[in-house]
Amino acid sequence: MKKLRFLIIGLLLCFAASMTAQDLGKNTENMKELAQTRVELKTTLGNIVVALYNETPLHRDNFIKLVKQGYYDGVLFHRVIKDFMIQTGDGNSKMATAGQMLGDGDPGYTIPAEFVYPKYFHKRGALAAARTGDQVNPLRASSGSQFYIVTGQTYDSARVSMMEQRLMQNRKQDLFNKIAMANRERIMAARTSGDPAAMQALEKELTAQYEQELQSETLLFTPEQRQAYTTVGGTPHLDGQYTVFGEVLQGMDVVDKIQNVATGANDRPIDDVKIIKAEIIEPAQ
């Protein structure tokens, strides 16, 4: 942790603004008591029904809003990787020509990350938000519209253990990011003051806080994760990196049809696969 000062400053310099909690999910009181909203995605290869988690209200409410606006009607599954995931939600894909590069279209905003981990993880059938990389998006804010459905693969116990070690490192970095951002004003003030003693004292304080909070972090896979990844499968290396905000209730056979289509450059299906219509079939109450 000797380089904590420089890591904190670097994080602040590449901080990307995201949509605030006040902009989304304003009516989320007693959200755990709400019935889960269900959305039907009518695709050219069949229908998929997904449930939206109430514990991720910003993503839930944004998804509902876009469905009601018809944003997803006509979008392509523009990125498909077998045994990994199928991705859609790029608004620019509706009128895309053959071979056109896709993946940058969105409503013009991002959504703050909502990691409900380890309760919700990247098991097969998980619905998760796409996002830009950590280099430009250290807080892992989600795309305003793009999402993916996990297909993944199964792993033996030894491989799961290896991925668990990588997860531990990711969780430690997440904790560091959280502490750094919570103290960003103090860090910038100490840096601006040019007082080495003040910066050193702050570094010592934040290091102690980091070590204390690390003790309460979930660093290992839960029994539920291990069972899922060794039986039905998933993408364990994405846990804690992308917001999981729902899951497939019906239509995994359709998801598998999509993941098995032939693809070309940039993993785009050669023959277009699209969402014809997205509809809410069980509105939030």
Image (tube, rainbow, N blue to C red):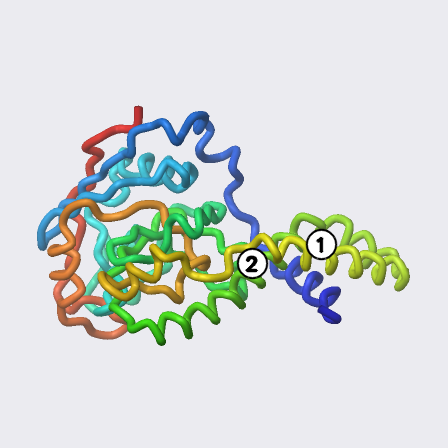
Crowd band around label 2 with a 10 angstrom C-alpha radius: few (<14), some (14–19), many (20+): some
Left or right relative to 40: residue 119: right
Q: Is residue 264 above or below residue 193?
A: below
The quarter in which the N terminus is drawn is bottom right
Residue at screen point 30% across, 57% down? 123
Marks 2, 1: nearer the viewer: 1
Q: Which mark is residue 61?
A: none
Amino acid at dot 2: Asp
Residue 266: x and y, percent? 28, 72
Residue picked out by circle 2: 174
Query: Counting other residues with Cα less than 10 Å from the Cα at mark 1, is it few (<14), some (14-19), or many (20 or more)?
Result: few
Residue 278 is situated, as x and y percent measured from the top left of the image, at: 20, 41
Q: Quadrant of the C terminus?
A: top left
Q: Quadrant of residue 187?
A: bottom right
Residue drawn 65% across the image and 52% down it: 181
Residue 175 is drawn in which quadrant? bottom right
Of all residues, the one furthest to the top in this rendering is 285
Residue at image x 83%, y 60%? 199
**Distance between mark 2 and mark 1 Cα atoms:** 14 Å
How many marks the image carries: the answer is 2
Q: Residue at coordinates 35% horizontally, 48% vertically from top-left?
A: 145
| Residue 219 horizontal side relative to residue 98, left or right | right
Q: Amino acid at mark 1?
A: Gln
Q: Position of residue 94 (x, y in %)?
A: 23, 52
The residue tagged with tag 2: helix, strand or loop? helix
Q: Nearer the viewer, residue 221 or 150?
A: 221
Residue 79 in sight here = no
Residue matched to label 1: 209
Give the vertical position of 49 relative to 226 (above or below): above
Closer to the chain start, of discs 2 and 1, is: 2
